Amino acid sequence: MKVRVLLVDDEEQFVEPLAMRLEARGFAVATAFNGEQALDYIKGKEVDVVILDVLMPGLSGVDTLRELKKIRPLTEVIMLTGHATVETAIEGMKLGAFDYLMKPTEIEDLVGKINQAYRRKAEHEERIQRATLERIAQTRGF
């Protein structure tokens, strides 16, 4: 199964080529150009990893992250930031982002972070599934 990535950035000239490069590396990529579009997308579709720009008009990256985690708490988020917004990216990590990368980022660094974030999400899901199965087994006397 392909890792499902949502790429959120208001710069279309950045998003489109990056989406193609990630797809060429085997990811299933969707795009959104602002926080509202991203939240609408994740309400209806399962996403493994969101790559989220910190600075966007309208809903900021941090505000988008906060709402996203309410809707999909297990979805991992990688914040993308410029030098001026490192503090904001760190704030994002306090709110549950997996990590952050500086823009511009090397594609291999981004691919590595996506894979790490996906592994963490899969581990969380597996632990929840195991705990659920154990609880069911206990209530049935196994």
Image (cartoon, rainbow, N blue to C red):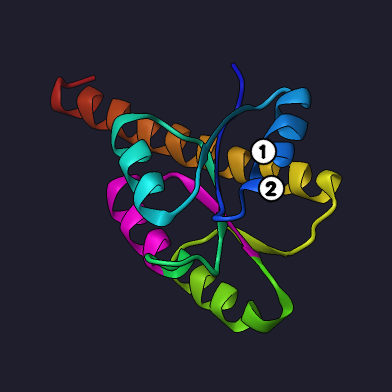
- Please, which residue is most extreme toward the top here? 1
x then y, percent, for residue 2: 61, 21
Q: Nearer the viewer, residue 132 or 77?
A: 77
x then y, percent, for residue 97: 52, 61
Start-end of magenta stretch: 63-80
Q: Dot 2 lies on which element? A: helix
For badge 1, the amino acid type reads Glu
x then y, percent, for residue 1: 59, 16
Q: Dot 1 lies on which element? A: helix
At x 17%, y 21%, the residue is 141
Asked which quadrant contains residue 35, the reply is bottom left
x then y, percent, for residue 60: 43, 68
Q: In the shown orientation, is residue 106 left or right of residue 45?
A: right
What separation in Å lies between label 1 and label 2 (alpha carbons)?
6 Å
At x 44%, y 35%, the residue is 125
State whether residue 102 is above or below residue 105.
below
Label 1 with label 2: CB-CB less than 8 Å? yes
At x 55%, y 78%, the residue is 88
Q: Write down the residue under mark 2.
A: 13
Q: Does the stretch in magenta take in 42?
A: no
